[in-house]
Image: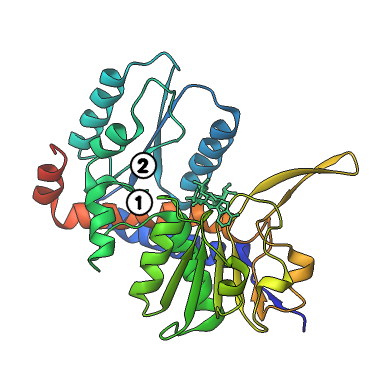
Amino acid sequence: MSAMVIDGKAAAAQVLEQVSAEVAQLNQAGVQPALAVILVGQDPASEVYVRNKVLRAGECGIRSLEHRLPASTGEAELLGLIHSLNRDPGVHGILLQLPLPAHIEETRALQAISPAKDVDGFHAENVGGLHQGRDVLTPCTPTGCLHLLHQALGELRGKHAVVIGRSNIVGKPMAALLLEADCSVTVLHSRSRDAAELCRQADIVVAAVGRPCMVDASWLKPGAVVVDVGINRIEEHGRSRLVGDVDFASASAVAGAITPVPGGVGPMTIAFLMHNTVRAARQQSRAPKEAACLSIS
Ligand code: NDP
């Protein structure tokens, strides 16, 4: 069998087209969606991520406001900036680029963002809402994965999904989203026993581990749909290249459909950041009092 390759670039382009159309509608109603991006320090990978996010926002007609702070910025100063952005009615989404310098407590900084403007979906209010099945802002990467799965499979009800990895950013919210989609969900992690055997029972496999090519054909049931979140840089024949957590060549001989790396989940993450920003702008422009109230939490 040769798996269908799920084209994340094309799917992301469709999402961004919808986002642009919604921005145009909001503009007509007098609302200019705006995303504030905060970068503390000069981590080279973070610089690239921020540049790409700002670029994509501009392409969709979303205004972006960059706040670049030196690595020496104190936690109080960062929290002060976040609180002022929470209060600013012209800002609809706040993205705090991670990782933060070690002297700043990450959880405290993320919790300072108003849940209404938390376009990354990392605030405890939104995390809890997701687990309660409420309509909240959800993390961009797993939301993008869910979108790809719906495109590949249509209805997900009753499918057995295995999520490999249990991070707060990908694995846990992915499991919660799949549960909400009526899948039966198994979450594997570094302490799981018989991981490959459990994975072989899955109709859907989402790998978010950070270990190059860990999942190969022997982990998969024939016809399984595989979403590879991993981004790993490896050196091969004196050249560096990106690979996922799934051994693409081996897995695609068994899987029914599979995302490539690059060109699979990566583009979806930014697309859903834009989607969340427009959603936040729509919600805040409908209920300005609620947004203002949440911004002082
Ligand atoms: P984390 O390091 O936070 O989490 C990795 C998870 O994998 C942990 O839960 C860990 O288990 C689990 N794990 C480690 N080894 C094994 C193993 N042998 N078997 C089963 N599980 C294992 O990573 P992230 O979730 O942040 O990211 C995962 C990958 O996804 C990375 O490659 C990252 O670069 C990529 N990524 C890609 C994005 C995109 O846009 N495409 C966005 C975000 C991440 P335990 O909890 O027990 O330690």
Q: Residue at x 41, y 78 (%)?
A: 184
In the picture as drawn, the residue positioned furthest to the front comes out as 193
Q: Residue at x 54, y 62 (%)?
A: 12
In the picture, residue 89 is in which quadrant?
top left
Q: Sequence-wise, which precedes: disc 1 or disc 2?
A: 2
Q: Name the residue carrying label 2.
A: 35
Instruction: Measure the C-alpha gap from mark 1 to mark 2.
Output: 7 Å
In the picture, residue 6 is in which quadrant?
bottom right
Please indicate whether residue 294 sits to the left or right of residue 68 in the image: left
Tell me if residue 278 comes above or below residue 204 in the rendering: above
Q: Camera-side residue: 122 or 289?
A: 122
Would you call the spot at circle 2 few (<14 residues within 10 Å), some (14-19), or many (20 or more)? many
Q: Are marks 1 and 2 in contact (CB under 8 Å)?
A: yes
Quadrant the N terminus occupies: bottom right
The secondary element bearing badge 2 is classed as: strand
The colour scheme is: rainbow
Percent coordinates x, y for residue 285 in the rendering: 19, 53
User: For residue 277, which numbered disc appears in the image?
Assistant: 1
**Residue type of the residue flagged with mark 1:** Thr
Q: Camera-side residue: 160 or 108?
A: 160
Q: Is any atom of residue 272 visible in this view?
A: no
Tell me if residue 142 comes above or below residue 273 in the rendering: below
Q: Residue at x 64, y 81 (%)?
A: 221
Tell me if residue 193 comes above or below residue 53 in the rendering: below
Percent coordinates x, y for residue 245 in the rendering: 65, 57
Q: Residue at x 50, y 54 (%)?
A: 269
Q: Camera-side residue: 51 or 230?
A: 230
**Residue type of the residue flagged with mark 2:** Leu
